[in-house]
Image (cartoon, rainbow, N blue to C red):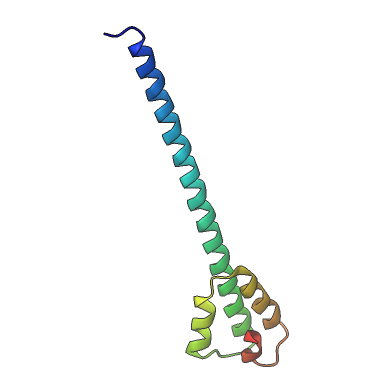
Amino acid sequence: MIEGYEQWRDDSLCEAWERGRVAGVVKAWAHTAKCEAKGKVEGLASALLLVLEVRGFTLSPSEVETVRGCSDVDTLAAWLRRAVTVEKAADVFL
């Protein structure tokens, strides 16, 4: 066996393991952030539909699809704010 090979091998394995562990943590963090964003979108969409329902508005299937198909948190939040005061449901999406 070459002198120092075992130490080099052990160090290399540890380094490779650590790189893999860090990559796994980064991947998990990215997945968590993506899930949190998706949860915010779904929560805002559900809240918007609920507010409109409670206010007595009936949405067309295309309006429901517009809400469910939106993935932008800022847009959904703006719609939700409008939903509290509009005279008709269509005004939410202006």
Which of the image's four quarters has the N terminus?
top left
Q: Residue furthest front?
A: 2
Q: Is residue 77 above or below residue 60?
A: above
- Looking at the figure, which quarter contains the C terminus? bottom right
Q: Position of residue 75 (x, y in %)?
A: 63, 74
Query: Which residue is nearer to you in this view: 75 or 90?
Result: 75
**Residue 93 vertical position relative to residue 2 in the rendered view, above or below:** below
Q: In this view, does 27 lie above or below 76?
A: above
For the view shown, which residue lies furthest in the right direction? 85
From the top left corner, tell me how far across and down residue 77 is, in percent.
Answer: 65, 72
- The quadrant in which residue 49 appears is bottom right
- Quarter of image, res 19: top left
- How many tags in the picture? 0
Identify the image quadrant of residue 88. Answer: bottom right
Q: Between residue 9 and residue 69, name the one nearer to us.
A: 9
Q: Is residue 82 left or right of residue 35?
A: right
Residue at (68% x, 76% y) in the render: 78
- In this rendering, position of residue 46 left or right of residue 87: left
Residue 74 percent across, percent down from the top left:
64, 70
Residue drawn at point x = 45 percent, y = 40 percent: 23
Q: Position of residue 27 (x, y in %)?
A: 46, 46
